[in-house]
Structure formats: structure tokens, C-alpha cells
Amino acid sequence: MGELKVIGAWSSPFAIRPRIALTLKSIDYEYIEENLRAKSDLLLKSNPVHKKVPVLLHGDRPICESLLILQYIDEQWSPGPSILPSDPYDRAIARFWAAYIDDKLSPAMLGMKAESEEAKAEAMEKMKMEFELMEKVFKDLSRGGGFFGGEEIGYVDIALGSFLAGVRVFESFSGVKLLDEEKTPGLVGWAQRFCAHEAVRDVMPKSEKLLEFAKKAFFNQPADK
Amino acid sequence: MGELKVIGAWSSPFAIRPRIALTLKSIDYEYIEENLRAKSDLLLKSNPVHKKVPVLLHGDRPICESLLILQYIDEQWSPGPSILPSDPYDRAIARFWAAYIDDKLSPAMLGMKAESEEAKAEAMEKMKMEFELMEKVFKDLSRGGGFFGGEEIGYVDIALGSFLAGVRVFESFSGVKLLDEEKTPGLVGWAQRFCAHEAVRDVMPKSEKLLEFAKKAFFNQPADK
């Protein structure tokens, strides 16, 4: 099949997903950092429909869309640590929540970069409710384990966990905790475990760097450098 | 696992998808027609997050979101005629286009119910381009067979084909052909084969009935009855 490459961008939560999955499965790959302000011919040729990162290049075959890449990795390299559960019903539930995270929670998160203080506060409240819902989902899916996937990191962990660096940035801007011991105690512990995991810690954007990036991109504030 | 029920609504393109898949696999199910203007407790309890049809009830377990239901059916009842391809790369490509149909093509289709004639005409042009793209996808995926799935109806066939009754309605309202022999010759033949297929013909909404429904719902015109 040839070599394996991930086209990504360090600040994109979606782009770290395939990298986490490949590391979980102990699969070597080459990482190509894309400049999203001047997209490469390789990206445009590999993902002509959406023109977005991440793309997984498996030999000369491109696979696009981060959640679909996760499923491809899981199906192409099985057996091995599995990303999705093995039971069809559990798989459907994992796919449901991962889709929910991308279709509902992720756009709600972007709402927090609203212009007015009022709209920002409203968006923060909405996000807190989203995480309270995720707390319930965590209880259901983890079945007493430390991850949505149970004892190990799985599909929903990667889908939600990829936003954790962004969560920290929004928390530090607003002074409001999106995850806290009172309302989302399960997620507080989960977030620590996820970010410290060996498959995650090296690809998760550093909070300080993302904060500087976000100041410019989201909040119209001058970055420190 | 207990009995199998599909909660649907006759006019919903999404709701016919699981019914087509179950018929392809020769699986018996009970169909429950939902009143979308007064949603049942069963629907609200089964799909509390989105409150939408279709829902597949497998015993007391609800599975939501039509594309996820298709994957569940395929995984739960295998072997048997398969909905998704068996090769991981082909599966990723099928999932990519099914997601594209729901995320891009389907909203573009709803754009055709715009208020002004100008906006309507623009939306029709956009839709024609979407179908020209689908013509290319058909050529790639069908590999000379009569369906996106090759020789048999598959995942992308069901995703796109479920909109064909709606396509006919928009064509008859606008007088513009969305599928034609010049630009989309492959899709013209495909649409005929799909709608005539024994797994499809009994669940596809009748054009006349859908036209009357659409007059009221989309075009603010009085229905004939």
C-alpha cells in the first residue's frame, strides 16, 4: 500500500485525531504541516471537495474527513487496539456521539468567539450545558472505566478530546470553567487522563501557543509575539 | 434481541433509508408512521437529542440518524447482501460521499424552496452542478455497474436515491430537469433502476402525493386536497 502521511495543521482539533489513532495502533507515519493561509497543491489535489485538513495519504490514496479517517484506520489495521467498539450497537452509539460532537458541540464552541460580551456569555452558558450532556454520556459509555471507550481511549474520546486545548483557551479568556468538579466531575478526570496519554500528549497543541494563536484568530487581540 | 421497528414519516427521504436496507437484507420489521406535527412519546423517548425520524428500534434499543442506522443494519446482519463495500478504502469513499450528500447536497436542495424567483433559479443551478458532480462520482464508484455500489444497491445509492422523489417534485415545479441525458446520462439510468428496484419501489413516496405535500410545505400553494 505504500507509505503513510498525515496532512494536518497544528492548531486544528480535527487534524490531531488521525495522529492519535495511528499512535494508539503503533503505526508510523510522516506528518506534513499545512499552511492553511496558502494551501498546498498536495492538499488541494488530495481533498478537492472540502480543501481541508486532515487528509490521510495511504500510498497515493487520500482519505478525508477526520472521523472517516479514524474508521479507516480502525478497519485497515485490525486487529490491534480498536478505536470503535466491537458490538454493532455500541458502534452505532459511539458514531452517534462523535457526529454530535462535530455537528452540534463544535459549532457551539465557535459561538464563543462572538463579538459582544452578552453573546459571548450566552455562548459560554450553552457550552457548559453541552459539557453537562457529555458528562452524562461519559457515565453511560465509560461503564466505570476512565474513558468513553471504557478502559482504553476510543472513538468518542478522540472526537471530544481533540477540543480540549481549545477548551482551555476559552476558559482562560473568559475566566469561566467549562469543566468543573461540581457539574462535570467525570470529565475533569477524563480530560487529565486523555491529555496525559502517551498517544495524545505529543500532538495536543500547547495551551500557551494556542492561546497566542487564538488571540489573533478569534479575539482580535494582538498576540504576544 | 427482540422485534424490529422503524419509526418514520412517509415524506422524509431520510426515513426510507433504513426500510430500503432492511428489505435488501430480507429482514422483517414493523413500520410506525410518525406525525411530525405532534411527535409521539415513543419518538421523543427514542431520540431525545434530535427528536427526528427515522429511528430503528431493535428490541428496546433505539438507533438514530439514518446513515448510522444503515451501518448498524449492515454490521448487525452480516453476512447477507452488504450495504457498504468490504474494502476499507472503498468504505471510506462510500462514507465520504454519503456524508457529502447529507451535509452539502441536501441543504442545497432545500435552497430551492427560496422565496424569490431569482433565488430559486440560482438554487436550481446550484443543484444541477451538484448532480453533475454526482455523475462523476457515479462513474468512479459504479465501475461499469448500474449502481454506485457496483452491481447492487449500496450505501451511496440509498443516501442519494432517497431524494429522488423530491427531485421529481422540484423538477415539476420549476420545469427544469435536474437530471438529463446531456449532463447526467449515468444518473438518468441509475434513477430509473433505483426507483424500480423491489427494495425501493414500495417505500419511495409517490410523486403526486409528495407534490401535493410540497405545495403546502414548501411553496405556499394550496394543495389540491
Image (cartoon, coloured by chain):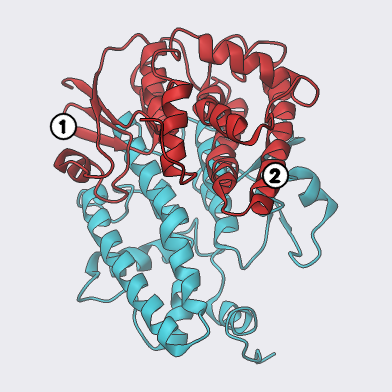
Chain colours: A red, B cyan
- Left or right: where A125 falls relative to B122: right
Query: Going 48% across and 19% down the picture, which residue do you hit?
Result: A83
Q: Which residue is mark 2?
A: A126
For residue B147, which quarter of the picture? bottom left
Q: Amino acid at mark 1?
A: Asp
The local crowd at label 2, few if under 14, some if 14 to 19, many if 20 or more residues have their Cα within 10 Å, is some
- Left or right: where A1 falls relative to A78: left
Instruction: Tell me which chain the residue with mark 1 is part of.
Output: A
Query: Going 74% across and 60% down the picture, which residue do you hit?
Result: B34
Asked if the residues shown at circle 1 and circle 2 are in contact, with their CB atoms under 8 angstroms apart, the answer is no
Whichever of labels 1 and 2 marks the residue nearer the N terminus, that label is: 1
In the rendering, at what x and y percent does residue A206 appear?
Answer: 44, 20
Q: Amino acid at mark 2?
A: Lys
Query: Going 60% across and 18% down the picture, which residue do you hit?
Result: A191
Instruction: Tell me which chain the residue with mark 2 is part of.
Output: A
Most foreground residue, B144 or B51: B51
B67 relative to A143, above or below: below
Q: Quadrant of the N terminus of chain A?
A: top left
- Left or right: where A96 falls relative to B146: right
B216 relative to B49, above or below: below
B124 relative to A64, above or below: below
For residue B136, which quarter of the picture? bottom left
Q: On residue A60, which mark appears?
A: 1
Residue B54 in sight: no
